[in-house]
Image: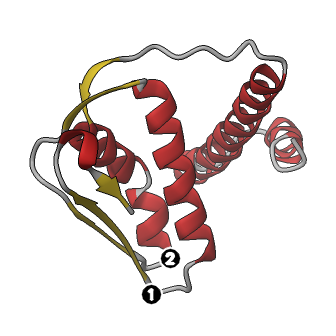
């Protein structure tokens, strides 16, 4: 909230401004609001896990699609820090899992990898094997 409220106050006090600059400030607020949402969601998930109210929704899905979409979602953040993301996996990786929970885990892994990689670094992911004997790293 410390990054959102001051920008809102500034926009309210400044009055009319260049549309491009106005959009830049709005995009900054959106970025921080999305980050706050992710932090709150993590807190809710951890709370549910601790009290035993965490349930899974197992269904047939494709891990390739989950990973591809997660990489696309963090591409802008990677580009800002000049970090390359490489994923080596088959074009299809069918399995039975909870898509939302796996996506959250892949997002967290990518977020940490980007946060702790040096500027200009490389993040690599690899999928090996088939079915129940598959390994992601």
User: Disc number at residue 81?
Assistant: 2
Which x, y percent locates residue 91?
Answer: 9, 48
Position of 120 relative to 136 (above/below): below
Is disc 2 surrounded by few (<14), some (14 to 19) or many (20+) residues within 10 Å? some
Residue under pointer 1: 120
Report the residue that reaches farthest toward the front: 133
Write the residue at 74% across / 39% down: 39
**Colour mode of the rendering:** secondary structure
Name the quadrant of the C terminus. bottom left
Is disc 1 surrounded by few (<14), some (14 to 19) or many (20+) residues within 10 Å? few
Position of 111 relative to 40 (above/below): below
Position of 71 relative to 54 (above/below): below
Write the residue at 44% across / 37% down: 103
Which x, y percent locates residue 126?
Answer: 28, 64
Disc 2 from disc 1: Cα separation? 6 Å
Write the residue at 56% across / 58% down: 111
Position of 35 relative to 21 (above/below): above
At mark 1, the secondary structure is loop
The numbered mark, 2 or 1, whose residue comes first in the sequence reads 2
Whether the residues at callouts 2 and 1 have beta carbons within 8 Å, the answer is: yes
Which x, y percent locates residue 37?
Answer: 70, 32
Which x, y percent locates residue 21?
Answer: 60, 54
């Amino acid at each position: 909230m410390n990054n959102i409220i001051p920008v809102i106050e500034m926009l309210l006090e400044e009055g009319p401004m260049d549309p491009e600059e106005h959009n830049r400030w709005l995009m900054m607020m959106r970025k921080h609001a999305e980050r706050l949402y992710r932090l709150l969601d993590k807190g809710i998930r951890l709370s549910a896990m601790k009290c035993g109210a965490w349930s899974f929704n197992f269904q047939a899905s494709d891990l390739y699609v989950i990973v591809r979409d997660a990489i696309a979602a963090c591409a802008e953040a990677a580009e800002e820090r000049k970090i390359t993301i490489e994923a080596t996996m088959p074009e299809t990786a069918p399995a039975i899992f909870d898509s939302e929970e796996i996506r959250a885990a892949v997002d967290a892994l990518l977020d940490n990898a980007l946060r702790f990689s040096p500027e200009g670094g490389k993040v690599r992911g690899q999928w090996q094997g088939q079915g129940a004997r598959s390994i992601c790293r």
